Image: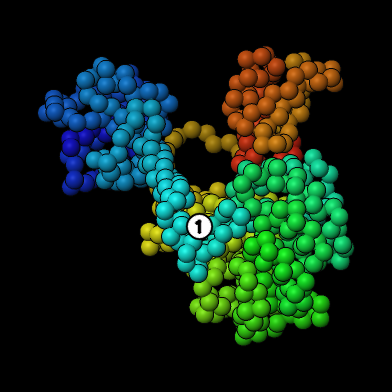
C-alpha cells in the first residue's frame, strides 16, 4: 500500500521512526504545527494540497493522528483519498501498519482502539461459542474432570466458575440480601454462596433465604456455606444446588440426602468435630482422597484449603493442590479469597495471579468473599481473570494480548514521551484563590449504585439531582442549566467529577474534597 501519514512537529521524528516498514510505501508529512492533535480536518486538507503530486498520486490512504476530535470523512470528500484515524500514540504505528490488510479503519475512531475492540470481540465470541456448544458440553460432561452444579458445567475443561459469598446472609434484611446478590451477579458471579454464622443453628431461616436468592439469580446455582448438618439439610430441601462443605465430621449425617437429591459438595480434608486440621501436604491429600471414597455416591469438588501468605504456608497448600490434581481427575475448589482478603495489596493483581495458578492446578471453582474495602470488586476481577486464563489455556499462550485484560492502574505499554521545547516563564503554582460563594448555588457529589450523583443546592435547599457514570456529561449538563457562574467553581467541579468517575471505575471510595490516591509508603 501507498500511505501518507500527517503529523505535527513534535511527533515528527517518532512517527518517521515508527512508520518505517518494508511492507508498505509510507510517506510522512510534518505539518507546520507543534502538536499533532491540534490539526483539524481542514488544516490537513490544505497540507495535502501542498504535497508534491509524485507522493499524493495513487495514494491508497491517509492516516491522521488518532487524537484529533473531528471526523476525517471531510478529508476523503475533499481530496478523493480515503482518510482514516491512525493510533492515539505514534508508538503504536508499527502494529497498525502491520495489520492494515486485516483492519477496517475508521474516520471517527482511533486505530488502536479498533484493534483493542476487535481483539476483545474475538475473545468474547470464542468463549460464547464454547459455552453455547451443547454437543461439546455433553461430550465434555462425560469426562471425570467435569461435573454439573445445577445446570452449570464445572470442571477442568470449562472456564473456572466464580463462587461469590454473601457473608452473614441470615442477618441481612431481605432488601439488602437482594441488593447484594444482584451486585454479585452483575459483576460476573457464576454461583452465589450463602454463608451462615459458625456456631449458630439458623436452619429455620435458611429456606426463605435460599428461595429469595433463587428468585433473583434465575438459572445460576446457589450454594450453602456451612458445616452444620441441620443447615445443610434445610438448604438442600429448599433448593440449594451445591454444599460447602463436607468433612470427616459431618458427611455421614447429610450424605443420604445429597445422594437422593444428586447434589454435589465441596469436601474438606478436616474433621472439625474433633478439631483436627491436617498439617502436611501428604495429610491434606490423603485425607481428601479418603473422604472422596466415603462420598462416592455424589460428585465432589475437593478443597485442599489455600492458606494465606505466611499463615501456615501458601506454598505447601499450593503443593497440596498440585499433588491432589496430579493423582485425581475432578476439579478442585480454589479459595482465592483466603489470600486476597488477608494481604494489604490491591486485589486486582492478586486475583489475576491466583486465577492463573488455579487454572494450572485444575481448579473448577474460584472462591471469593468481598468483605474488606480492598477486596471490593473481586468477583469482577476473578470473572475477567477466569476468561483470560481460559483463553490462554486454549490458545496455548501466556495470558497477554488476549483481547481481555485487568490493567486498571497502569499502562500496558510504556510509550515514548515527546518533549516540547518551550521558552516561556515557568512558575511554581501556589494556588490560594480566596473562596467566593457562587450565586448559582453549590453541589454535593456522591458515588452510589454505579452512578455519580450531583445534587445542586441553592440557599441550603436541594433543587435538582443529576446522575450519570460520565463526568463530562455531568459538567456539560451543569453548564447547560446555568448552575455554575464562577470560573474557579467550574474548575473545582470538573476536578471533583473526574475524581468521582475514576472512583467509579476503580472501586475506590469517593469523598468530596478529599484526595483519591496517595503513594502508600515513602521509601
- The answer, for residue 91, to whether it is visible in the render is yes
Q: Quadrant of the N terminus?
A: top left
Between 93 and 154, the residue placed more toward the observer is: 154
Q: Is residue 276 left or right of residue 521?
A: right
Q: Quadrant of residue 421?
A: top left
Residue drawn 31% across the image and 46% down it: 95
- Position of residue 192 relative to residue 232, above or below, is above
- Residue 376's place in the image compared with 42, above or below, is below
- Indicate left or right for 156 with 496 as reference: left
Which color mode does the image show?
rainbow
- The residue carrying mark 1 is 159
Mark 1: few/some/many CA within 10 Å (<14, 14-19, 20+): many
Q: Position of residue 286 (x, y in %)?
A: 62, 84
The quarter in which the C terminus is drawn is: bottom right
Q: Position of residue 109 (x, y in %)?
A: 39, 31
Image quarter of residue 247: bottom right
Left/right placement of residue 171 relative to residue 436 reads right
Identify the residue shown where x is 79% and y is 58%.
234
Specify the farthest residue to the left: 54
Which element is circle 1 on?
loop
The structure residue drawn at horizontal position 45% and vertical position 34%, both measured from the top left corner, is: 423
Number of marks: 1
Residue 81 point in image, percent of width and height: 22, 24
For the question of whether residue 491 can be seen, the reply is no
Q: Is residue 113 left or right of residue 228?
A: left
Amino acid at each position: 500500500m501507498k500511505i501518507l501519514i500527517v503529523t505535527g512537529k513534535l511527533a515528527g521524528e517518532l512517527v518517521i521512526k515508527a512508520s518505517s516498514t518494508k511492507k508498505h510505501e509510507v510517506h510522512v508529512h510534518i505539518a507546520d504545527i507543534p502538536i499533532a492533535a491540534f490539526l483539524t480536518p481542514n488544516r490537513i486538507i490544505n497540507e495535502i494540497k501542498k504535497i508534491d503530486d509524485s507522493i499524493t498520486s495513487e495514494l491508497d490512504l491517509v492516516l491522521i493522528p488518532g487524537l484529533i476530535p473531528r471526523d476525517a470523512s471531510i478529508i476523503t470528500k475533499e481530496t478523493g483519498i480515503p482518510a482514516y484515524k491512525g493510533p492515539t500514540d505514534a508508538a503504536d504505528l508499527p502494529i497498525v501498519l502491520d495489520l492494515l490488510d486485516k483492519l477496517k479503519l475508521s474516520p471517527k475512531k482511533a486505530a488502536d482502539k479498533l484493534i483493542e475492540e476487535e481483539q476483545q470481540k474475538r475473545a468474547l465470541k470464542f468463549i460464547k461459542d464454547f459455552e453455547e456448544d451443547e454437543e461439546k458440553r455433553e461430550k465434555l460432561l462425560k469426562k471425570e474432570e467435569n461435573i454439573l452444579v445445577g445446570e452449570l458445567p464445572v470442571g477442568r475443561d470449562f472456564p473456572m466458575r466464580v463462587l461469590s459469598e454473601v457473608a452473614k446472609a441470615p442477618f441481612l434484611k431481605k432488601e439488602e440480601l437482594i441488593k447484594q446478590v444482584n451486585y454479585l451477579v452483575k459483576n460476573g458471579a457464576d454461583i452465589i454462596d450463602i454463608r451462615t454464622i459458625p456456631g449458630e443453628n439458623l436452619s429455620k431461616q435458611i429456606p426463605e433465604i435460599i428461595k429469595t436468592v433463587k428468585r433473583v439469580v434465575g438459572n445460576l446455582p446457589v450454594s450453602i456455606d456451612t458445616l452444620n448438618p441441620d443447615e445443610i439439610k434445610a438448604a438442600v430441601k429448599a433448593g440449594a444446588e451445591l454444599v460447602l462443605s463436607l468433612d470427616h465430621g459431618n458427611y455421614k449425617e447429610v450424605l443420604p440426602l445429597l445422594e437422593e437429591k444428586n447434589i454435589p459438595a465441596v469436601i474438606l480434608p478436616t474433621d472439625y468435630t474433633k478439631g483436627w486440621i491436617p498439617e502436611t501436604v501428604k495429610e491434606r491429600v490423603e485425607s481428601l482422597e479418603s473422604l472422596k471414597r466415603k462420598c462416592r455416591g455424589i460428585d465432589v469438588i475437593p478443597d485442599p484449603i489455600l492458606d494465606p501468605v505466611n499463615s501456615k504456608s501458601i506454598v505447601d497448600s499450593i503443593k497440596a493442590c498440585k499433588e491432589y490434581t496430579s493423582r485425581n481427575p475432578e476439579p478442585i475448589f480454589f479459595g482465592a479469597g483466603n489470600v486476597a482478603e488477608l494481604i494489604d495489596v490491591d486485589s486486582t493483581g492478586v486475583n489475576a495471579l491466583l486465577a492463573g495458578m488455579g487454572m494450572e492446578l485444575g481448579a473448577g471453582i474460584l472462591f471469593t468473599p468481598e468483605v474488606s474495602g480492598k477486596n471490593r470488586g473481586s468477583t469482577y476481577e476473578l470473572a475477567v481473570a477466569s476468561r483470560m486464563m481460559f483463553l490462554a489455556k486454549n490458545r496455548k499462550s501466556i495470558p497477554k494480548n488476549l483481547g481481555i485484560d485487568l490493567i486498571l492502574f497502569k499502562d500496558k505499554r510504556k510509550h515514548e514521551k515527546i518533549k516540547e521545547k518551550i521558552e516561556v516563564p515557568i512558575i511554581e503554582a501556589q494556588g490560594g484563590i480566596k473562596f467566593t460563594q457562587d450565586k448559582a448555588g453549590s453541589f454535593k457529589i456522591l458515588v452510589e449504585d454505579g452512578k455519580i450523583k450531583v445534587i445542586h443546592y441553592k440557599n441550603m435547599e436541594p433543587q435538582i439531582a443529576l446522575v450519570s457514570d460520565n463526568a463530562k456529561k455531568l459538567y456539560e449538563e451543569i453548564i447547560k442549566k446555568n448552575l455554575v457562574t464562577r470560573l474557579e467553581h467550574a474548575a473545582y467541579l470538573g476536578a471533583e467529577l473526574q475524581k468521582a468517575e475514576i472512583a467509579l471505575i476503580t472501586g475506590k471510595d469517593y469523598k468530596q474534597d478529599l484526595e483519591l490516591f496517595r503513594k502508600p509508603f515513602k521509601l
